Image (cartoon, rainbow, N blue to C red):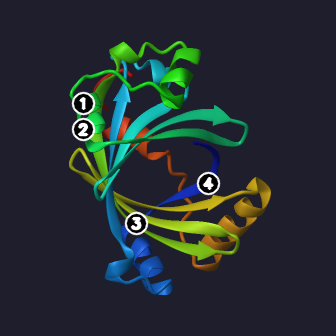
Amino acid sequence: MQELEIEFRNMLTEREYQYLIDLFRLKEEDFFEQTNYYLDTRAFALKNKQSALRIRKRSDQFELTLKTPEGKGLLETTQILGSDQAEAILNGSNIPTGSVRDLLEKLGIDYNELEMFGALTTIRAEKDYQDGLLVFDKNLYGGITDFDLEYEVENYEEGEKIFYKLLEKHEIHQEEAPNKIERFYKHVYQNKNI
């Protein structure tokens, strides 16, 4: 399965996050937890190609997703995994045959060298908003807790207008949010030159 991901992201303070939760009347039952396990080679071959590979666990479901640059967004190539496959990959086994492995080969990435570098857990709620999807995230990784707002859309120009108008209307400080794997690498590996 492949889809183009176009999203806008803004870091939030805890106070801004709580304000938006209240504004959109999100309740405890609207939230769910997911964990991303990030994989790359020791030389960060994927990172060096502005790409990322993760296994996402949500409830008892696992997805293997490779994100690669595509125009103004990211192309997400996803395979569903069984729990045994996910566990095997996290313990050092090869990526199973399929679309993700095929694309890794096209990128020149040796899937035999992939290692799990760590995990980031997100407590998330989603809300439909003006032909897009608002995503409210609380993220926990490497002893850090941060908050961000994402807006997933199909049209870049329209989505950009709507997202920044929302921030301005509610006096949310605009702070560019690197994607989660970038933040993970920055905080967890801040003393390493990667």
Residue type (three-letter) at the residue carrying disc 2: Asp
* Residue 184: x %, y % from top left: 35, 41
Tell me the element at label 4. Answer: strand
| Crowding near the residue tagged with mark 2, few <14, some 14–19, many ≥20 C-alpha atoms within 10 Å | few
Proximity of marks 4 and 1: CB atoms separated by less than 8 Å: no
Q: Residue at 50% across / 45% down in the picture?
A: 178
Residue toward you, 40 or 18 = 40
131 left or right of 189 in image? right
Does residue 43 appear anywhere in the picture?
Answer: no
The N terminus lies in quadrant: top right
| 4 vs 1, front mark | 1
Tag on residue 139?
none
- The image quadrant that residue 165 belongs to is bottom right
Number of numbered discs: 4
Q: Residues within 10 Å of mark 4 (few under 14, many from 20)?
A: many
Amino acid at circle 3:
Thr
N-terminal label among 4 and 3: 4
Q: Which residue is mark 4?
A: 7
Asked if the residues shown at circle 2 and circle 4 are in contact, with their CB atoms under 8 angstroms apart, the answer is no
What distance separates the C-alpha of mark 1 from that of mark 2?
Answer: 6 Å
- Residue 13 shows which numbered tag? 3
Q: Is residue 144 left or right of residue 68?
A: left
